[in-house]
Amino acid sequence: MIIGAVYLILFILLIRYNAFFGWFKDEVLSGSKLAMVFFLKALAVPVMYLLYSKLYGGIENFDSGVFFHDAAELNRLALRYPMEYLKAMAGLQDDSAGSFFFEQYTKNTFNWDNGRIRILFYNDNRIVIRLHSIIHFFAFGSYFVHALFSCFLSYLGIFWIYRSLKSFFTGREFTLLCVLSLFPALWIHTGALLKEGIAVFVMGAMMYTVFQFINGKRTRGNLVLLFVLFYISLLLKPYLLLYSLLCFSLLFLLQKTNITYKSLVFTAVLISSLCVFDLGVRFIENKSLLEIAHMRQVVFSDAAKGGIFLIDSVKFIRIHYDISLVTELPEKKGYYTIKKNVPYMYWEHTHQQDTFVCAKNIDTSSIYQLAYTMPESSSNLSYPKERKPLFFTVLDGFYYTLLHPLFFNARSIPQQLASFENLLLVFALVISFYGLLFSRRASLPSIAFLCFALGECLLIAFTSPNTGAIVRYRSPAVVYILLCALYYLPDMKFLFSKTTTK
């Protein structure tokens, strides 16, 4: 905690007096304002840690703690076997079961081989682990330093988003930065060692690079950077980052043209692009995007049920979350055998994309190491097994991503907080739709914001049937609903002032 506080003070001073070597230089906002917002944003680090400590007993068995553990393990590999570490950083490691890298690293981790199930795109954990293994060199073993660096990277990404969009918010630049930085779910999830912090950094870097490129700064360095960011997006969170690239590239391109009906052109090009993408996926995968989203939903639902996870040199096993189904070896703590007739699922290390099911275990002598245990999530959503018509599926998606929970059906403190956020989003949508219908402002920015946010909501609803996951995954996207409301807010003030005058 103390080391984290030292780093926090250093970051604040560098932003305040040095614009962090020019990265936070802005013509409108002063260094003191930028430093103050970062301080408020960094408060998410202890808040997130305390929240998990009080409600769940700690972060150790959740993504943030697991990433911390795996990054520390990879860092230890660097100290013992530097060449193996360099190969792992370059993606040249030998991951096969029984390999030196597997024995020295993979078998001691949780997320290195988790999150790489390929359903159209990777959802790769390794970028996060690699990055934080570097941070571990100067984190001195502190989780808080890792979380603070994640928070700082997200703030840098948010600053680039602010730089790209501030021309739409003249006179409200500080409010724009505050909304992006302090939106509750985005604030707290970028204050932990999670993918969201890095994803927002990549989104901001990509958006600002495209913005500069379209507005005349067409350097070779910008082009190379854009290709690198595009490649990272393919691995990290493609459903978020590639869609944001499409939406905001269209926004910046159309903003520079003299085309009439820009909003209609934006919508037409966006729908056409998605249809072309769907056709391409059908040709390559022989499945539609909706079918692939349903496959992802099944995989996610299965994982959200939790379980007891065991590992040996051949396979990775998941058993129902019931300790009576396994027997711990009295002479070897943390090692178990599986009782007779116990059903389980398993994955073999040599081909991890294939899931196998053992209906009744007959092997009671094989010994497995406990990887981790995870109880079933209390916020799982029950989607009907039969397919509904698309219209009702879309309505359900918006309900679960924007209106659920809403106080009366909240079952925990986090769901009460999510209810407050949902109420905020509904209020912002009312302002946004009112502005679209009655404001004389150019509708292109608001159309881009809403298409991005609502499109992400639908995708997340289809693929992640869990309230906690929805609140977390949607956070980098739904903040644009608030930006849409902020865009029209001056017109709302004018409306109220007219009403008062009458």
Image (spheres, rainbow, N blue to C red):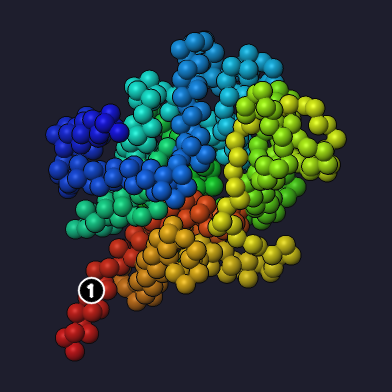
| Above or below 51: residue 352 | above
Residue type marked 1? Lys
- Quadrant for residue 362, please give it: top right
Seen from the viewer's position, the closer of residues 454 and 256 is 454
Name the element at disc 1. helix
Indicate the position of residue 30 as horizontal and vertical percent values: 15, 44
Residue 304 seen from this side: no
Q: Residue at x 47, y 27 (%)?
A: 71
Seen from the viewer's position, the closer of residues 280 and 350 is 350
- Quadrant for residue 141, please give it: top left
Indicate the position of residue 462 as horizontal and vertical percent values: 61, 57
Seen from the viewer's position, the closer of residues 396 and 218 is 396
Query: What residue is disc 1 on?
Result: 493
Q: Residue at x 54, y 64 (%)?
A: 400
Q: Residue at x 30, y 33 (%)?
A: 1
* In the image: residue 182, left or right of residue 118: left
| Above or below 6: residue 442 | below
* In the image: residue 99, left or right of residue 231: right
Indicate the position of residue 295 as horizontal and vertical percent values: 69, 50
- Quadrant for residue 465, please give it: bottom right
Number of other residues with Cα within 10 Å of mark 1, as a class: few under 14, some 14 to 19, many 20 or more: few
Q: Residue at x 28, y 29 (%)?
A: 3
Q: Quadrant of the C terminus?
A: bottom left
